[in-house]
Image: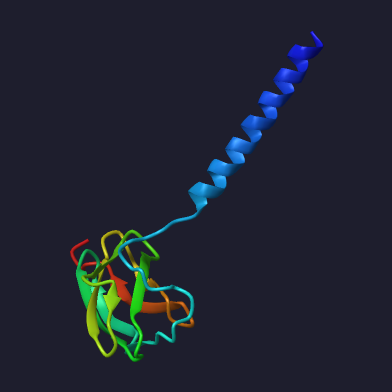
Amino acid sequence: MVKLKKLAGDLYKMKYILFTFLFVFSCTSYSDNHPTDLIDNNAQISVKNNIFDFGEIVQGEIITATFKISNLSSSDLIITNVKSSCGCTTSNLKKDLLKAGEEEIIEVTFNSKNKIGKQEKTVSLLTNAIPNTTILTIRGNVIIPENK
């Protein structure tokens, strides 16, 4: 009976060690797409006019804003994630790696369906630049159509 308890305890410890190993291993990632080190490599991002004000639109209209992103450094600029603040806002980025001096256009689309009043939505670009987050903002006022 003592041997069974010891065996059960050893199995529990091994299960715990295996679980811990798998958890730690699953939290790490490796990407073949961008071998460039994401730690500061002097990458610099610039966005001309990072705020787009669409003024006043009628509820249900869809607005698309374009933002020009530039890599001002001599290193690669890697955009690792693009995240919208709301489901009504989407973005379209064709390239996630900009070489030195390259520019890219990102389109941000806002759907005003079921929205009313002042709106301010953002798209966050996570990059290897410092600071690593760049915010693009689209804002304006949504009014109810007169026929409602």
Q: Quadrant of residue 135?
A: bottom left
In the image, 132 versus 120, the foreground residue is 132
In the image, 101 versus 1, the foreground residue is 1
Q: Quadrant of residue 106?
A: bottom left
In the image, 17 versus 139, the foreground residue is 17
Q: Position of residue 86 (x, y in %)?
A: 37, 62
Q: Position of residue 81 (x, y in %)?
A: 37, 66
Q: Is residue 7 left or right of residue 126?
A: right
In the image, 22 versus 71, the foreground residue is 22
Q: Quadrant of residue 124?
A: bottom left
Point 31% across, 62% down: residue: 88
Of all residues, the one furthest to the right in this rendering is: 2
Q: Position of residue 55 (x, y in %)?
A: 28, 82
Point 71% across, 19% down: residue: 8
Point 21% across, 73% down: residue: 63
Point 73% across, 23% down: residue: 9
> Where 91 sits versus 19, above or below?
below
